[in-house]
Amino acid sequence: MSESTVRIGLVLPDVMGTYGDGGNALVLRQRLRMRGHNAEIVEIGLNDPVPESLDLYTLGGAEDAAQRLATRHLQRYPGLQRAAERGAPVLAICAAIQVLGHWYETSSGERVDGVGILDATTSPQQTRAIGEIVIRPTLSGLTQPLTGFENHRGGTTLGSDATGLGRVDRGVGNGVGDGLEGAVQGSVIGTYLHGPVLARNPELADHLLMRALGVDSLPPLDLPEVDLLRQERLRA
Amino acid sequence: MIGGLVALKIDPALMKQLGHGRQTVLVTGTNGKSTTTRMTAAALETIDSVVTQADGANMDAGIVAALATDLRAPLAAIEVDELHTPHVADALDPRAIVLLNLTRDQLDRVGEINMIERKLREGLKRHPDAVIVANCDDVLVTSAAYDNPNVVWVAAGAGWANDSVSCPRTGEPIVREGDHWYSTGSDFARPTPDWWVDDENLYGPDGLVLPLKLTLPGRANRGNAAQAVAAAVALGADPAKAVAAASVVEEVAGRYKTVQVGPHSVHMLLAKNPAGWQEALSMIDPTVDGLVIAVNGQVPDGEDLSWLWDVRFEHFEGVQVVAAGERGTDLAVRLTYAGVEHTLVPDPLKAIASCPPGRVEVLANYTAFRDLNTAIARRAAHV
């Protein structure tokens, strides 16, 4: 087993923590610990510069004002961008897709420059997308459908450097008519799925962990309640 | 409830008529509305007779029904849903409005908390004569009340600061230093409280100090009591009598009650949102024989249970925990990743039965709580 500690960045939970997405970092840490790795969560708040040395990063959803604070902070302390450049996995949920894109429009119609590590732009849609969502992943290495709960008004258009995380089976997803959900570019994975997404989709959690550890496989974990939760939510 | 609905259809001005000539206190906020309304009603009873809701029905129909229960009572203590508060205040022209706290409720239904604050702020502006009894530990409540000329500030506590990291007025960060907080974007800051509580006493204006021993558990209820007493005092109640009356409130619409179910003495706690859950978890007695946590995801509960991950479950060493409810599996997975040993028994009655004989705490969200109460009553009828 690895002697070193895997460090999971939970980026700006004080402003990007509206929908339980901090759970993603917890799931990652626990799945490492259950396999005998040392792992810890590093919370990076609005008062902290963003370190570029962590092994992987997670960001959660936010409301408009908080989203703007987060965007400004990430631009001022570009540790996340540098980490993504060297290939550290980044999981960006909901508003975080918008923050990491080129720009997003607020509900009042103002355009805010994003961080720019996802080739994506976001504008408000007519109606808010709320409900259970199921997508078929198109990301290599994922075989199981992804289940989550979406709750967003933003509609995200991908540029040519980004691809979707998957195709929508049920729900709205990116909401711009191309049937796609999420945004993937290099080591950055964005998705509108809450739940949290990694609690409901262990295959995606382990995909991120394998990338962070630089391995091709991980020993399976026997968590029957997680399997049951997947069955229930995919049926819902 | 049906009576209320029919009445409102017959005459939309009925609420206004039923409120006319009464001195009314409205109570609103995300958490503690029913409890604080009950305490306020008790404190107002020390002045004269009071109408109030028995059941927590806090929208138009329920309010009309409550007002109609006694047409002669000169006082009213009325619980109001946050988004209904502006038009209910317009209809009832209250003497006082109690603002408890504003935090996330069901995300998939109600929308964003800052919008609610702005609507409350606009509504309160139309009532400059009302005494606003506002919790100055809550940034959003403070913002809603800040522009009114007649505010009584109560330091009622803020168990959940996660929803106010940015200033509701400027969007800039809120800085917290001990109990104090201030916005970095303007001169908006925590006002000096007129009332506050500690573990022993209630403190009020002009050096008032009164021992405060509540029947109800938890830090949040001490804050609720402070706001109820402050509101009653604003209407002329004697502070010591108001405190005594609020202190003996022991059960609120089935919440906090203890019932015997077979070999189990079951203590029932209701929590409807992350702030309420964190508060209720802090009321759990660590020496109990079992803890049943029941979660549903019906429309009244909110269908998105992601918030379970915002609640800290990590402190139940040595208590047998049972995950229950229609969404018990979501909770079980949350507990698994929190490292809390547990079992999963979806039916809450069977979950209680699975605990060792003795004292069991039950913590449930809205429909799970309601359905379990019904099931316990039905079981009792058959025994």
Image (spheres, rainbow, N blue to C red):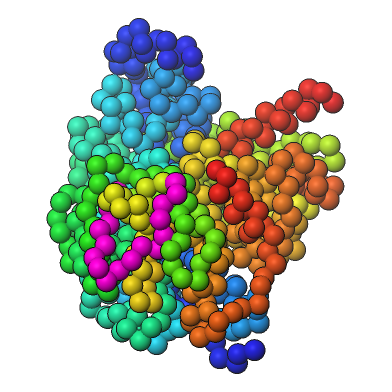
Q: Is residue A203 visible?
A: yes
Image location (x, y in percent) of residue A100:
28, 69
Magenta stretch: give its range.
A153-170
Looking at the image, which residue sits at the far bottom?
A3
B170 sits left or right of B201 in the view: left
Q: In this view, does A119 lie to the left or right of A136?
A: left
Q: Which of B358 and B375 is in front in this view?
A: B375
Q: Can you tell which quarter of the image residue B281 is in? A: bottom right
Q: Which residue is drawn at 47% across and 26% down?
A: B57
Residue at 45%, 83% (x, y): give it: A55
How many tags in the picture? 0
- Compared to residue B273, the image places residue A75 above or below, namely below
Which quarter of the image is occupied by the C terminus of chain B? top right
Please say if A46 is above or below B93. below
**Residue closest to the far top:** B10
Which percent across, then down, holds residue B42? 51, 30
* Above or below, comparing residue B159 to residue A25 in the picture: above
**Residue A180: x %, y % from top left:** 35, 56
Q: In front: A48, or B107?
A: B107
Q: Does the magenta stretch include residue A163?
A: yes
| Residue plotted at (28% across, 21% down) | B91
Magenta span main SS: strand
Asked whether B305 or B349 is in front, the reply is: B305
Q: Which residue is drawn at 68% across and 46% down?
A: B324
Residue A164, image x and y in percent?
A: 36, 62
Asked if the stretch drawn in magenta spans residue B44, the answer is: no
Residue B161 in view in this figure: no
